[in-house]
Image (spheres, rainbow, N blue to C red):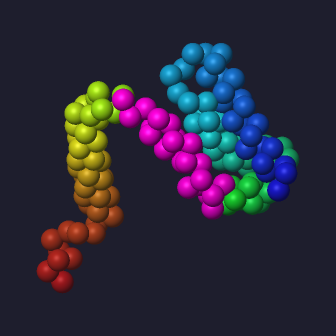
Amino acid sequence: MIPGAALILLCQLVGEALVHGTGWPLPGPVVGMVLLLLLLLGNDLLAEPLDTRFVTGPADGLLMNLTLLFVPAGVGVVNRMDVLAAHWFALAASLVVSTLLGLVVTALVFVAVARMTGRGSKEEAGA
């Protein structure tokens, strides 16, 4: 479990260093997660591939306790109620627009995939 957690934290550290070094407007942990994904995807290309099973233990542990990781963010939001009160309309509008946009994109992707796989065609509906 320790090597897997070390790999996850190393990828996060490299992501943080990249973001601070380049000035990218991205969170360091997100860049680290992309690096971990690329490492795991390119694992077969290595001369001596890593045993990726050791990453699943720490990853499962993080996923099981994911809700606890949102507590500090929730406390931060509650501590800044003055900002929420000052910008409530913009926040509400962005939530509604992004939700509607997400629904539209999901529907369009569903329709495109259904057409590509041949499901949902008129021939199948009549059968």
Tell me if 93 is positioned left or right of 64 in this view. Answer: left
How far across and how far down the image is residue 119, in percent?
Answer: 28, 69
For the stretch drawn in magenta, the main secondary structure is: helix
Q: Residue furthest top?
A: 22
Answer whether residue 55 is magenta in the image.
no
Of the 4 image quadrants, the one containing the N terminus is bottom right
Q: Residue at x 67, y 42 (%)?
A: 36
Tell me if 64 is positioned left or right of 25 in this view. Answer: right
Asked whether 35 or 78 is in front, the reply is 78
Q: Would residue 98 be visible to someone looking at this image?
A: no
Q: Residue furthest bottom?
A: 127
Q: Residue at x 59, y 48 (%)?
A: 69
How far across and how far down the image is residue 9, in percent?
Answer: 74, 40
- Looking at the rendering, the stretch of residues picked out in magenta corresponds to 62-82
The correct choice, above or below, for 70 with respect to 127 in the image is above
Of the 4 image quadrants, the one containing the C terminus is bottom left
Q: Residue at x 71, y 37 (%)?
A: 11
Answer whether residue 81 is magenta in the image.
yes
Give the quadrant of residue 51: bottom right
The correct choice, above or below, for 99 with respect to 20 in the image is below
